[in-house]
Image (spheres, coloured by chain):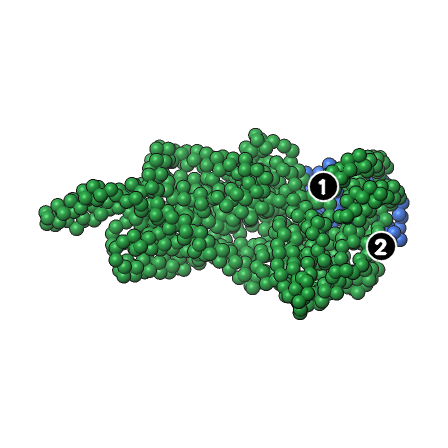
């Protein structure tokens, strides 16, 4: 027996729930890696780079393009601590280097 | 009675699975306020009403795509063992992320009950969850619980019984966007037609895992049907290329995005209401801003460590003295009430001096464990991992290596065996092996009494300071060794580190006492069993074969001569003869011969033959060093008036001085891990090669350091 939830799945790499069409999130020119986003406070993820496994790992933790997060312990060429999806994640410099964010 | 129901506790790391497991089964599995405490499945049983239930506590995982060894343990169990009911523990205070795994259970179609844990914490944070709506939207029972207090657990068990075997379960289908859905529509029929793992998983789930590039599932598919498997992988690759070129994302990111979209849509249908501002920083976040600050953070960490050691040594001393006095009294009673012979010698030198020497440190161990339990339960240890991460990367290790180091005795008092097992959270094999090989350098609970003994004998004025220095030295040597290994035999790239930080929690007194007692009891139990056995064995090795008759006769003749001479200092001369005979007998014993045999090498580090015996015994278990020293020095001690402690005996021994003490300290801290740890390394590394390597590498490193300390110290005139 199956139950189809296709009618309520709707969020397409943009964080915009109203638009179900899959589209590329473009990073603006002022986007910086999280590791260099010292003092930025609230930011929005615009791109995640790095190897495939790492991207998958970040995705499972809810860190995706369009996700909003708050820098608790701001990174300045080092690891950082972010509040995202109600939890707190610590990321080292390598992980933070691969997450590009823009100010909200 | 009915057949037992098999249930599995599954959920995100640090969601409270083990707390619930302990509550249900009455077990005392270790819990801690940081992710990754459980790295292997634990089994227990209970009877609810008339219904027997077998429970398995699984390691935490964020996703059913396994990224590390302990996540594989969880997934393999769920898929291969097929429990009757999966109890999905969901942290109510962090609902969105926790429901991501729930979503995957629903897709897998496993019979499930959601235990919405920590509802009390969520309420304090202003989060209200409508469990009825959540349950009807997900199509599975949702039971609010507080695992720490047991609130709601009865209702959970009733729900588990109502869900169990034979019921039909929903297999939820989510939409992942046209590209992925179209590919799934093509590959799922192929999977079904070719019966690819269809006996294990739903076909759509297998298809999704192939698109998510799940290596283990792809390997299984390939093993079943290589050519069809390759076709499916090629379809996945084509989709990946398309998504990369159009949205610059991998399929797993798009799939995750839709799952989170599904979760958000569920939560917005009246499931979750926030009393407070969503963006509000909680107390935990505010504390973190200070405690993990780049400048202040390390200072706070150093102060906490020093404070812990001061607390331990300042407040446990009187209890240590009482225990010393107690064992001295027992020794005196045995001495005065038994006639001379091997049994008396074994009881005094083997049992009381050996095991008593180890048990004498129980108060120190207990105080140290209590302090560590406070740090662990409060959530501070996870912050230590965050702060140490940068340093670890510099030395070629990984952020996930920090917790194994701490578990192994990074704050003095852990154990290398669970530390070695905790390396399962590392996914890079080279970083994992480097961590496996270096965690035994930490000052585990077994080394603690040895360090305390030597420090109190030679550096008693600054015990806390020396213990702090020993901790720093352990970390430094471990990190330098890791750097060396990563630059030579374990060369490779570093991998990124991401860890979820638990919120700070006030430790409960009950929890602290349980944690302290659990570890202390382990120590006492080990002293009363393994250490007792080894102590008696070593006593026998230090007692037999005894002196040959002609040598004994020589000593007897000398005694007779002294007695006949009626010299004023005859009593002292007789004592000297006794001491000489005891030492000669010890030298002639099996253990003595080993110790003397090693002296030709160990003399460069300043170790005498008696110390060598203890160090060889230490390979069985490090505590044995204390018990063996106790036995070795009590066998040589013949003064009937003497009930002095072992540290006092060492301090006045002619072969010991502060330089030798430092040299011995260094050797004990860094030489070959104990036998159990070596076995654990072989098991975790999957080969004995690394286990033998750790024995050889550590011993050579430790000996080199000891020789350096002894030779330089002697040259500078400190000896």
Q: Are marks 1 and 2 on the same chain?
A: no
What residue is rendered at 85% in x and 41% in y?
Answer: B190
Please indicate whether residue B184 sits to the left or right of residue B384 in the image. Answer: right
- Number of residues whose C-alpha sits closer than 10 Å to that of mark 2, classed few (under 14), some (14–19) or many (20 or more): few
Q: Which mark is residue A2?
A: 2
> Camera-side residue: B389 or B266?
B266
Q: Chain of mark 1?
A: B
- Residue that sits furthest to the left in the current view: B565
Chain drawn green in the picture: B
Q: CA distance from mark 1 to mark 2?
A: 26 Å
Residue denoted by label 1: B216
Q: Is residue B280 visible?
A: no
Q: Pick the quarter of the image with the N terminus of chain B.
A: bottom right
- Number of residues whose C-alpha sits closer than 10 Å to that of mark 1, classed few (under 14), some (14–19) or many (20 or more): some
Q: Quadrant of residue B483?
A: top right
Q: Quadrant of residue B210?
A: top right
Tint of chain A = blue
What residue is rendered at 54% in x and 58% in y?
Answer: B515
Q: Pick the quarter of the image with the C terminus of chain B.
A: top left
Q: Taking A10 as reference, is B85 above or below it? A: below
Q: Chain of mark 2?
A: A
Q: Taking B606 as reference, is A61 above or below it? A: below
Q: Position of residue B603 (x, y in %)?
A: 35, 35
Please indicate whether residue B361 sits to the left or right of residue B132 in the image. Answer: left
Q: Position of residue B433 (x, y in %)?
A: 58, 38
> Camera-side residue: B669 or B315?
B669
Q: Which mark is residue B78?
A: none
- Residue that sits furthest to the top in the current view: B488
Q: Position of residue B420 (x, y in %)?
A: 56, 44
| Label tally | 2
Q: Is residue B154 visible?
A: yes
């Amino acid at each position: 027996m199956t139950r189809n939830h296709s009618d309520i799945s709707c969020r397409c790499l943009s964080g915009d729930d109203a638009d179900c069409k899959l589209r590329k999130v473009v990073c603006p020119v002022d986007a910086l890696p999280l590791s260099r986003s010292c003092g930025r406070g609230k930011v929005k993820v615009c791109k995640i780079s790095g190897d495939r496994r790492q991207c998958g790992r970040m995705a499972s933790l809810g860190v995706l393009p369009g996700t909003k997060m708050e820098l608790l312990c701001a990174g300045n060429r080092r690891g950082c601590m972010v509040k995202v999806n109600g939890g707190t994640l610590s990321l080292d410099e390598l992980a933070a280097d691969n997450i590009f964010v823009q100010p909200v | 009675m009915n057949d037992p129901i098999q249930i599995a506790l599954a959920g995100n790391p640090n969601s409270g699975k083990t707390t619930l497991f302990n509550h249900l089964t009455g077990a005392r599995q270790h819990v801690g306020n940081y992710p990754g405490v459980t790295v292997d499945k634990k089994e227990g049983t209970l009877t609810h009403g008339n219904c027997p239930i077998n429970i398995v506590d699984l390691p935490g995982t964020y996703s059913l795509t396994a990224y590390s060894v302990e996540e594989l343990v969880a997934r393999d169990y769920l898929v291969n063992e097929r429990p009757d009911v999966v109890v999905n523990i969901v942290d109510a205070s962090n609902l969105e992320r926790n429901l991501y795994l729930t979503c995957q259970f629903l897709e897998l179609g496993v019979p499930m009950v959601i235990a919405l844990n920590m509802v009390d914490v969520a309420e304090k944070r202003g989060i209200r969850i409508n469990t009825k709506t959540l349950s009807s939207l997900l199509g599975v029972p949702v039971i609010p619980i507080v695992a720490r207090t047991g609130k709601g657990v009865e209702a959970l068990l009733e729900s588990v019984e109502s869900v169990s075997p034979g019921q039909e379960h929903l297999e939820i289908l989510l939409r992942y966007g046209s590209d992925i859905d179209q590919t799934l529509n093509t590959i799922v029929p192929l999977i079904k037609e070719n019966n690819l793992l269809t006996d294990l998983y739903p076909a759509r789930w297998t298809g999704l895992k192939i698109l998510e590039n799940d290596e283990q599932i792809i390997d299984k598919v390939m093993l079943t049907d290589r050519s069809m498997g390759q076709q499916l992988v090629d379809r996945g690759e084509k989709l990946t290329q398309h998504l990369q070129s159009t949205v610059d994302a991998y399929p797993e990111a798009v799939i995750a995005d839709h799952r989170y979209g599904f979760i958000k849509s569920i939560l917005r249908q009246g499931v979750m209401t926030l009393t407070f501002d969503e963006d509000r920083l909680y107390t935990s976040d505010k504390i973190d801003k200070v405690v993990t600050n780049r400048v202040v953070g390390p200072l706070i960490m150093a102060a906490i460590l020093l404070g812990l050691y001061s607390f331990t040594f300042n407040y446990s001393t009187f209890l240590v003295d009482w225990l010393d006095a107690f064992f001295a009294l027992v020794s005196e009673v045995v001495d005065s009430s038994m006639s001379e012979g091997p049994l008396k010698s074994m009881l005094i030198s083997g049992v009381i001096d050996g095991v008593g020497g180890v048990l004498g440190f129980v108060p120190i161990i207990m105080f140290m464990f209590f302090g560590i339990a406070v740090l662990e339960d409060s959530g501070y240890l996870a912050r230590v991992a965050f702060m140490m991460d940068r340093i670890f990367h510099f030395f070629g290790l990984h952020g996930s290596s920090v917790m194994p180091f701490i578990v192994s005795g990074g704050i003095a008092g852990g154990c290398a065996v669970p530390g070695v097992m905790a390396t399962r959270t590392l996914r890079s094999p080279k970083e994992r092996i480097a961590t496996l090989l270096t965690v035994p350098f930490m000052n585990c609970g077994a080394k603690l009494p040895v360090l305390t003994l030597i420090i109190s004998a030679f550096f008693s004025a600054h015990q806390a300071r020396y213990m702090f220095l020993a901790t720093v030295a352990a970390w430094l040597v471990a990190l330098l060794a890791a750097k060396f290994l990563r630059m030579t035999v374990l060369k490779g790239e570093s991998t990124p580190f991401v860890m979820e930080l638990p919120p700070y929690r006030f430790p409960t007194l009950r929890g602290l006492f349980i944690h302290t007692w659990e570890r202390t009891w382990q120590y006492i139990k080990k002293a009363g069993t393994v250490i007792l056995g080894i102590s008696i064995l070593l006593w026998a090795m230090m007692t037999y074969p005894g002196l040959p008759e002609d040598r004994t006769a020589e000593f007897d003749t000398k005694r007779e001569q002294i007695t006949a001479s009626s010299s004023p200092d005859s009593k002292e001369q007789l004592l000297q003869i006794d001491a000489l005979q005891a030492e000669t007998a010890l030298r002639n014993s099996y253990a003595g011969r080993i110790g003397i045999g090693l002296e030709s090498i160990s003399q460069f580090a300043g170790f005498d033959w008696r110390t060598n015996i203890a160090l060889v015994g230490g390979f069985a278990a490090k505590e044995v060093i204390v018990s063996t020293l106790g036995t070795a020095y009590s066998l040589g001690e013949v003064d009937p008036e003497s009930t002095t402690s072992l540290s006092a005996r060492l301090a006045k021994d002619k072969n010991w001085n502060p330089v030798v003490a430092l040299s011995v300290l260094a050797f004990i801290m860094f030489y070959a891990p104990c036998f159990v740890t070596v076995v654990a390394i072989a098991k975790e590394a999957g080969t004995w090669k690394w286990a033998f390597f750790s024995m050889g590498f550590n011993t050579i490193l430790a000996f080199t350091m000891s020789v350096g300390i002894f030779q330089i110290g002697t040259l500078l005139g400190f000896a």
